[in-house]
Each structure stands twice: as structure tokens, then as C-alpha cells.
Image (cartoon, grey):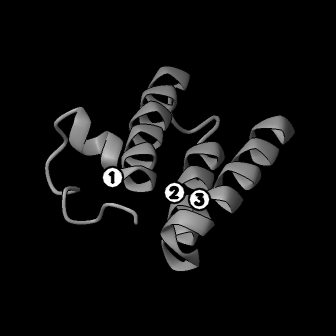
């Protein structure tokens, strides 16, 4: 669990540069909610939720990639 928390902290720290701290804080809270679900939700459900959230985070951090893979709604937020 500690390794997961460190990974999330590093990833969200880098994401704050791309997304802004408010949006990065939102993702951090959502990652933490998944981590805190240990024992309350099945591990497979938590893993699938983590995959879905990570995909959403990846698309938010890289709107060019999101457009490349055909995810709608990111084409207007390309980086300079």
C-alpha cells in the first residue's frame, strides 16, 4: 500500500504541471478513495476502477494522445 501511495504522489505531482493543482487534487482524491476501499470492495473491482481512473488521467494529461486514440472532448485542449 505504501508503494501505491508513493506512486500516486509522484504521478499526481507530475500531473499537476499539466492539469493544474485543482484537477490533480481531484484525481488524487479519487485514487485515494480506491486505495481506501481495501476490504470493502472486491480487489478485482478496485483494480478495474484503478485502470479506468488511470486511463481518464492519461487522457486528461495528454489531449493529443486522447485525440489520436479517438477519445471525444479533448481536441480543444491541446498543449502549445
Earlier residue among tags 2 and 3: 3
Spatial CA span between label 2 and label 1: 20 Å
Considering only vertical position in the picture, is 32 above or below 17?
Answer: above
Direction top: furthest residue = 44
Considering only vertical position in the picture, is 76 above or below 63?
Answer: below
Q: Which residue is drawn at the image coordinates 44% and 44% (left, top)? A: 58
Spatial CA span between label 2 and label 3: 14 Å
Direction front: furthest residue = 80
Relative image position of residue 27 (x, y in whole percent): 52, 60
Relative image position of residue 21 (x, y in whole percent): 58, 76
| Secondary structure state at the residue bearing disc 2 | helix
Q: Which residue is drawn at the image coordinates 55% and 24% (left, top)? A: 43
| Secondary structure state at the residue bearing disc 1 | helix
Q: Report the quarter where the C terminus lies.
A: bottom left
Relative image position of residue 2 (x, y in whole percent): 85, 41
Q: Which residue is drawn at the image coordinates 48% and 71% (left, top)? A: 23
Mark 2 = which residue? 30
Q: Give the quadrant of residue 28.
A: bottom right
Mark 1 = which residue? 63
Determine whether label 2 and label 3 are within 8 Å by CB: no
Q: Which residue is drawn at the image coordinates 48% and 40% (left, top)? A: 54
Mark in the foreground, 2 or 1: 1
Amino acid at each position: 500500500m505504501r508503494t501505491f501511495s508513493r506512486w500516486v504522489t509522484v504521478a499526481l505531482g507530475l500531473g499537476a504541471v499539466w492539469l493544474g493543482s485543482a484537477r490533480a487534487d481531484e484525481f488524487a482524491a479519487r485514487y485515494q478513495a480506491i486505495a481506501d476501499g481495501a476490504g470493502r470492495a472486491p480487489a478485482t473491482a478496485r483494480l478495474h476502477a484503478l485502470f479506468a481512473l488511470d486511463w481518464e488521467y492519461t487522457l486528461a494529461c495528454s489531449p493529443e494522445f486522447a485525440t489520436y486514440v479517438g477519445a471525444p472532448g479533448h481536441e480543444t485542449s491541446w498543449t502549445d
